[in-house]
């Protein structure tokens, strides 16, 4: 079977000039797109990583140099078959971050709109900390917000003040696949997804979040990542450039997964682990080492590696701890429980392969892989590198079987330094207040 694939680019320069780049002007084997929904080699929650576009294209115009293309906007279109879909096969919006030119050929690297979240969370105004997220959330509510709403506030309002790319989002665009708050762990006071039984006690408002004063992390993307970790998923930019939250798919809600047959993989590229990873428990640990966990128990299957999800020093959990545990003598039980009811359904079997089928795959997708003997394996896609007419390199990470650590944000040393500043400031306040 011959699979036909087509691609083109729309390039808009910062000065407003627009150019259509047909596939005839795209240098062969140069167009690729890499994306991920997991940080590193350990399966976990909270990844907020920009997708990266690489391409070489020919642009015959004597008055356009490399500096003219820097910070340009590129829209990628690609599709299988002779007939383009209604949206032209739109795949994403990218911002040029690096460009070189030789003769009339431009070599370009670009990131999707997730890169706009790498902006400062501080405004240098008001109190000594000036944290815009803290001010925005605490201005309108001291008792807490739905975490799902906070996601929209940070992406649409706070980041929107920095760049128009992030402004004007509606909450309906921020959640993939028609997700509702009730199906997202900790997104709101109520959670009814993944066979979670009703307690008869109504909503659990201890799932609501704000921020404690003194939070020092200076990167908006960190806060989006902490929220994504708190709600058990990841954040990406959709094909229109909107930042959206996604959960990992699982057989609970996705009854008919895509089946990728052995014949669709490039020869000698399919490798499937002889073990699977079972997320048997969730543990939350605060700055002063308070801990709550919930578990369904370890798997008895011989091929299963039992792994505990550990969420540590998450600022939104710290708020829940401060107001629900310390002030009201509660616990974090109603935070860890929905995460475990959701995560234990996720199918994690490490694999890697180059897929040459005629379907575009996506991050977090629950799939089945049929090997050469007809055996089917359930797993989840965590990394994709698409190459124009070169297939999709896909994999599920999981080589590291240690307890899942908190998602890595930016440079770990920088992040830990900021967390230390936060803890020192809070300790100082307690001492000054006689606490």
Image (cartoon, rainbow, N blue to C red):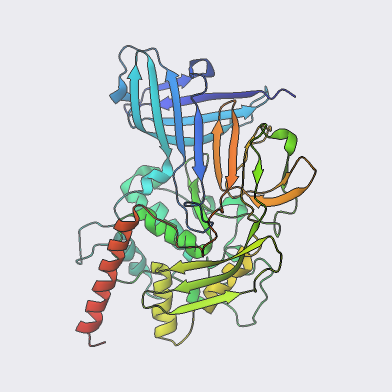
- Location of residue 338 in the rendering, given as x and y in whole percent from the top left corner: 59, 70
Q: Is residue 189 visible?
A: no
Can you give x and y, in whole percent of width and height, for residue 277 in the image? 62, 59
Residue 243: x %, y % from top left:
47, 48
- Residue 396 image offset from top left, x and y in percent: 59, 49
**Residue at the spot 33% in from the left edge and 61% down from the top edge:** 133
Residue at x 24% of width, y 72% of height: 425
Q: Is residue 157 above or below residue 322?
A: above
| For residue 402, above or below residue 263 | below
> Residue 112: which quarter of the image?
top left
Residue at 48%, 77% in the rendered image: 206
Give the residue drawn at x 64%, y 53%: 349
> Extreme right residue here?
374
Residue 206 lies, with reference to residue 420, above or below; the image says below
Total numbered badges shown on the rendered structure: 0
Tell me the quarter of the image containing the N terminus. Answer: top right
Out of 381 and 111, give the one closest to the viewer: 381
- Give the side of residue 428 with respect to residue 412, left or right: left
Is 43 placed left or right of 250 in the picture? left
Quarter of the image with the C terminus in it: bottom left
Please indicate, yes or no, whether residue 385 appears anywhere in the rendered image: yes
224 or 374, which lies in front? 374
Horizontal arrangement in the rendering, residue 271 relative to residue 77 (left or right): right
């Amino acid at each position: 079977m011959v699979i036909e694939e087509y691609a083109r680019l729309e390039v808009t320069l910062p000065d407003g000039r627009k150019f259509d780049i047909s596939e005839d002007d795209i240098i062969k084997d140069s167009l690729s797109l890499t994306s991920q929904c997991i940080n590193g080699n350990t399966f976990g929650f909270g990844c907020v990583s920009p997708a990266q576009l690489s391409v070489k294209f020919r642009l015959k115009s004597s008055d356009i140099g490399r500096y003219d293309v820097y910070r340009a906007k590129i829209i990628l279109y690609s599709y299988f078959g002779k007939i383009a879909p209604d949206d032209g096969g739109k795949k994403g919006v990218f911002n040029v971050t690096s460009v070189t030119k030789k003769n009339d050929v431009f070599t370009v690297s670009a990131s999707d709109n997730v890169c706009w979240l790498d902006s400062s969370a501080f405004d240098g105004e008001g109190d000594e900390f000036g944290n815009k997220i803290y001010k925005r959330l605490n201005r309108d509510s001291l008792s807490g917000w739905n975490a799902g709403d906070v996601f929209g506030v940070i992406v649409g309002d706070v980041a929107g003040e920095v760049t128009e790319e992030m402004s004007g989002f509606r909450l309906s665009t921020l959640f993939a696949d028609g997700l509702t708050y009730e199906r997202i762990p900790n997104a709101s006071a109520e959670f009814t997804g993944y066979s979670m039984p009703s307690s008869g006690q109504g909503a659990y408002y201890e799932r609501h979040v704000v921020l404690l004063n003194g939070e020092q992390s200076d990167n908006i993307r960190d806060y989006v990542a902490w929220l994504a970790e708190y709600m058990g998923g990841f954040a990406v930019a959709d094909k229109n450039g909107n930042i959206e939250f996604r959960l990992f798919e699982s057989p609970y809600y996705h009854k008919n997964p895509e089946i990728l047959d052995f014949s669709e993989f490039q020869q000698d590229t399919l490798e499937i682990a002889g073990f699977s990873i079972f997320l048997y428990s969730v543990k939350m640990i605060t700055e002063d080492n308070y801990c709550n966990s919930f578990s369904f128990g370890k798997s008895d299957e011989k091929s299963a590696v039992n792994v505990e999800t550990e969420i540590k020093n998450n600022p939104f959990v710290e708020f829940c701890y401060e107001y629900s545990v310390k002030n009201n003598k509660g616990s974090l039980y109603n935070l860890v429980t929905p995460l475990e009811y959701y995560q234990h359904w996720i199918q994690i079997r490490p694999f890697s392969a180059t897929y040459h089928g005629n379907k575009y795959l996506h991050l977090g997708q629950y799939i089945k892989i049929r090997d050469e003997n007809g055996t089917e394996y359930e797993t989840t896609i965590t990394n994709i590198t698409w190459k124009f007419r070169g297939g999709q390199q896909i994999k599920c990470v999981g080589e590291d079987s240690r307890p899942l650590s908190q998602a890595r944000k930016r440079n770990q040393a920088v992040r830990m330094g900021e967390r230390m500043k936060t803890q020192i400031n809070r300790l100082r306040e307690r001492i000054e207040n006689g606490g």
